[in-house]
Image (cartoon, rainbow, N blue to C red):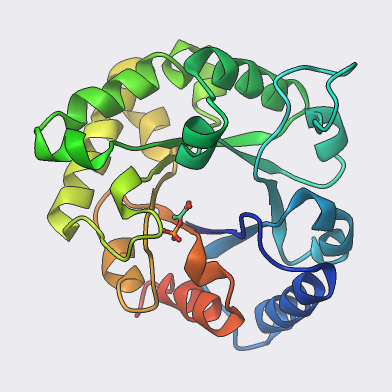
Amino acid sequence: MKYIIGNWKMNKTAPESIDFMRKLSSFLMEDTYDFNCHVVIAPPVIHLPHCFQFSKEINLAAQNLAAEDFGAYTGEISAAMLSEYVKYAIIGHSERRQYFQETAVILNKKITMAFKYNIRPVFCVGEKEQDRELGNYFNVIEGQLNETIMLLPDEHLSNCIIAYEPVWAIGTGKTPSLAQIEEMHAYIRKMLVLKIGKYNASKMPILYGGSCSVKNSSSILHQNNVDGLLVGGASLDFMHFKEIIECSDTSC
Ligand code: PEP
């Protein structure tokens, strides 16, 4: 079963969100729809209540959650509040790390909050372009995992979804080669096998994210160890996102 997660980031008005969700929900309810896929949308938080009416067909994710449980944190949204609407939360996205200075310490608090309120983390890791050029990318990803989700008790780690998102591929139209994607996913899987054993590691979804499009999604999804996609820009257009979902059909 593949995961296709659309991250709308800071895009779409309320009417635009509802229009998209209505179209997506109708598509997923069609008799002919038989794809091997969990579809998840991460809308801006203010649209979660509108989008929730479609939650029978479409799972929802938060794009972020507060590191603290409750209290005097102006502007923050807690995991408890989000848990009324979402099953998943994106944590560790490179934009949060870069623009909001989210360090491993903060990310670990957010992961703790997610589990406290039964929200499944979609934990993002990714190397910068310079790390790729210097051949340092395995170390970077290993470091990002070791200082965060690898510290979790095994039952929590096993319940995480990992998204490998090279920072240089996000929103740039550049993607790693299929071999580079497969190589990194295999590396992450190997780390998981060492930590939680072959069976549990094989069940953990490892998604790819970074300039996924209608053109490249099918081939990326067919790589070993790629269990789905985290889609940014291409998730904003219903027809593009629908075609990406159709790529998750094993026959395509
Ligand atoms: C993302 O930001 O998670 C992402 C994958 O963006 P894009 O698809 O636009 O590169």
The image shows residue 157, relative to residue 175, as above or below, that is: above
Is 216 on the left or on the right of 159, as rendered? Answer: left
The image shows residue 138, relative to residue 223, as above or below, that is: above
Image quadrant holding the C terminus, namely bottom left
Image coordinates for residue 4, horizontal then vertical, percent: 51, 60
Residue 18, by quadrant, is: bottom right
Image coordinates for residue 176, horizontal then vertical, percent: 21, 55
Q: Quadrant of ligand 1?
A: bottom left
The image shows residue 201, relative to residue 239, as above or below, that is: above
Query: From this viewpoint, is residue 1 visible?
Result: no
The image shows residue 111, relative to residue 19, as above or below, that is: above
Residue 57, by quadrant, is: bottom right
Q: Residue at x 60, y 80 (%)?
A: 238
Q: Residue at x 29, y 32 (%)?
A: 188
Q: Residue at x 28, y 23 (%)?
A: 142
Query: From this viewpoint, is residue 68 visible?
Result: yes
Is 107 on the left or on the right of 55, as rendered? Answer: left
* Most foreground residue, 250 or 112: 112
* Most foreground residue, 37 or 116: 116
Q: Residue at x 60, y 88 (%)?
A: 32
Image coordinates for residue 136, horizontal then vertical, percent: 14, 28
